[in-house]
Image (spheres, rainbow, N blue to C red):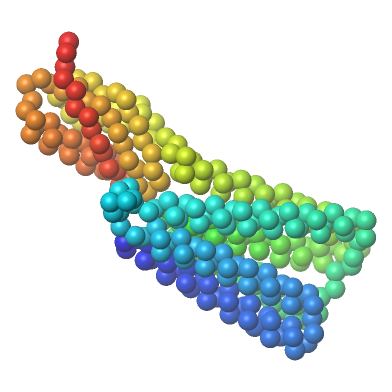
Amino acid sequence: MAKYKKISQILWLVLFFNALIAGLKIIIALKIKSNSLLADSYHALGDSFTNIIGLVGIKLAGRPADKSHPYGYQKFETIASFIIGIILLLLSIQMIKVTVSKFSDPVLPVFDFWSMLFLGLGFFGNIIISITEYQKGKKYKSEILIADATHTATDILISFGVILTLILIKAGASPLIDPIVSLVIVALIILSCLSIFKDALHILLDKTMIAPEIISEIIYASEKDIIDVHKIRSRGRKDYIFVDLHLILNPEMTIKEAHDLSHRLENILNQKLKKSVELNAHIEPNEK
């Protein structure tokens, strides 16, 4: 599918950037023997790992529907975004552990020139990546791009927290400001995790995607031969929705006319909802 090919291309570019930055950080860190920069380089490698998860999810999601999976494999993208949410949650837990220990034993942050240089480059680079991924995620309605953009945004928050802490300490603030700022950042990251989990679970648990009232209103306004529409259900993803419903039609309609009407309704729902809709209409006789 063309959509998944474009998403995959974006993820490959992000993976290349993250791997390049991580490699440069490792080389410089080993050369100057900077533990802080080496630790940050491993975190950058973690970013590359989430990109790989995304690529695997997109590869599987792009497979066409078959006999064993007649509704397609799109939920693999949702599963991949859920896994990224778990990684973010684990990162948050680790940050909480480190932060709590700093309250009892505050440490004055120390950064050398190279650490600060790569911190700045990573900060601005991640801003560009996060904004681009989020915009493309909205355009293609891709959960994995939005989840990965959220993960990149956490790196921005962490870098911002480090820079803010250094500025405040330079201005005379207590070293305790470091764990305080870290806790605020962790809280924001956890909120991002919950947002990813919420969106993913709605899809995995087949939450109603379109309110039945909206669907019935569109149908009644489009076709005069429909006497009643009921038992309306919808599920799927933001970009592709399956709709099941029951129709009571004008008894004078032939089977072919009813069949053609169901196809017209599917096209109308596609146009009005501005989404890909697959309609399954059950025709009932008018017994009144």
Q: Quadrant of residue 162?
A: bottom right
Q: In the rendered image, is residue 108 in sight?
A: yes
The foreground one among 261 and 231 is 231
Point 76% across, 66% down: residue: 163
Give x and y (percent) for residue 115.
Answer: 75, 77
Task: Please name the residue shown 85% across and 54% down the image.
Answer: 100
Where residue 260 sits, quadrant-wise, is top left
Residue found farthest to the front: 68
Q: Is residue 155 above or below residue 225?
A: below
Seen in the picture, residue 288 relative to 216 is either above or below; the reply is above
| Spot occupied by residue 200 in the image (x, y as percentages of width and height) | 51, 47
Above or below for 226 versus 148: above
Q: Residue at x 78, y 54 (%)?
A: 96
* 2 on left or right of 288: right
Residue 177, visible in the rendered structure: no
Rendered residue at 23%/39% (across/down): 266
User: Where is the N terminus found, in terms of image quarters?
Assistant: bottom left
Quadrant of the rendered image containing residue 30: bottom right
Where residue 127 appears, x then y in whole percent? 59, 65
Quadrant of the rendering where the C terminus is positioned? top left
